[in-house]
Amino acid sequence: MMQAKAQPKITVPKLQAMKNEKKLVMLTAYDHTMASLLDGHADILLVGDTLGCVVQGEETTLGVTLEQMSYHAAMVRQGAQCSLVVADLPFGSYQQGENGALEAAIRLIKEAKVSAVKLEGGSEVCGSIAKMTHAGIPVMAHIGLTPQSYHAMGGNKVQGKSSSSAQKLLADAKAVESAGAFALVLEAIPADLAREITEALSIPTIGIGAGSACDGQVLVINDLIGLNQSEAPMRFNKEYCAVRNLIQDAVGAFAKDVREGAFPDESYSY
């Protein structure tokens, strides 16, 4: 079993200093056990609102509440000794204005004890980014395919394919950096555009479906390890193993032993 080497706690300044020095690794986590297993392998653990899909079984992330995010983020923070823990601001917690965004971020910092928050959007959320940053809360931005805009985008579709939309994303990237974001997630955009954005910014970019030129990469852990009923549909989801098969084999063997009276035998009894 490959264990992560002991390493110092990752902080926001350390993370920013890694740009152009080493590739950053970010993974999602939703509970203490998974966070403990991933800690140290990942520079960043993201408590993503993707829990709405991979944990709750919903089609989108839109129904996730701030209370649910705080609950899951607190468990992840307990399991992470080295990795920087970032929590998503869920849909509805920051769309109504800067004060609401700050209030939601403060709650995640105080209740879940995460180190930073993430929100989706470009120039339209810069006021909220600035307000949170001025309050001492590190903010990670997210542009491109933004799952909280699922209905407006007509589903999960690649963004930035036209010249005008590419220029809009580049402008958004520069705007969120100027507003104070310490890092930027680029999701489902052409690789050439991701390279241009990465080279234009002084903050790290984290790609997902955005090519190899980004400063780091992120995947949903359930997709990476095959902890789903079937392979994830998006092209950028590389499945490194299929844990679902191991689980089904194990529980199938257990069920067989129970039904045949083979478990528990004397070695598993008092």
Image (cartoon, rainbow, N blue to C red):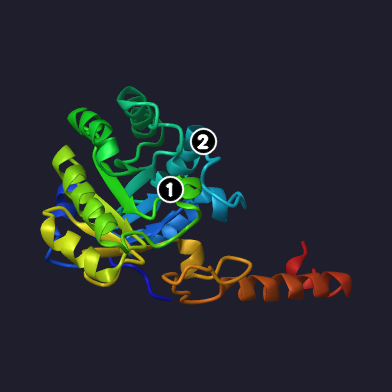
Amino acid type, residue under disc 1 in the picture: Val
The 10 Å Cα crowd at callout 1, few under 14, some 14 to 19, many 20 or more, is: many
Q: Could you tell whether 228 is left or right of 217 in the image?
A: right
Q: Position of residue 110 (x, y in %)?
A: 36, 30
Image check: 61 left or right of 258? left
Q: Quick check: 89 above or below 106?
A: below
> Could you tell me if the residues under marks 1 and 2 are in contact, i.e. CB atoms within 8 Å?
no
**Residue 84: x %, y % from top left:** 29, 50
Select label 1 or label 2 by which is in front: 2
Q: Quadrant of residue 236?
A: bottom left
Give the Cα separation between the discs numbered 1 and 2.
17 Å
Residue carrying label 1: 76
Q: Which residue is mark 2?
A: 65
Left or right: 13 as drawn, with respect to 187: left
| SS at mark 2 in the image | loop
For the C terminus, the quadrant is bottom right
Residue 34 in sight: yes
Residue at 32%, 22% (x, y): give it: 99
- Residue 238 is left or right of residue 99, and the answer is right
Give the percent coordinates (x, y) of residue 158: 39, 62
Which quadrant of the view contains residue 20?
bottom left
| Front residue of this view, candidates 256 and 94 | 94
Q: Is residue 31 visible?
A: no
Question: Looking at the rendering, in which quadrant would you find the N terminus?
Answer: bottom left
Residue at 46%, 62% (x, y): give it.
Answer: 221
Residue 54 occupies which quadrant of the picture? bottom right
10 Å crowding of disc 2: few (<14), some (14-19), many (20+)? some
Q: Callout 1: helix, strand or loop?
A: helix
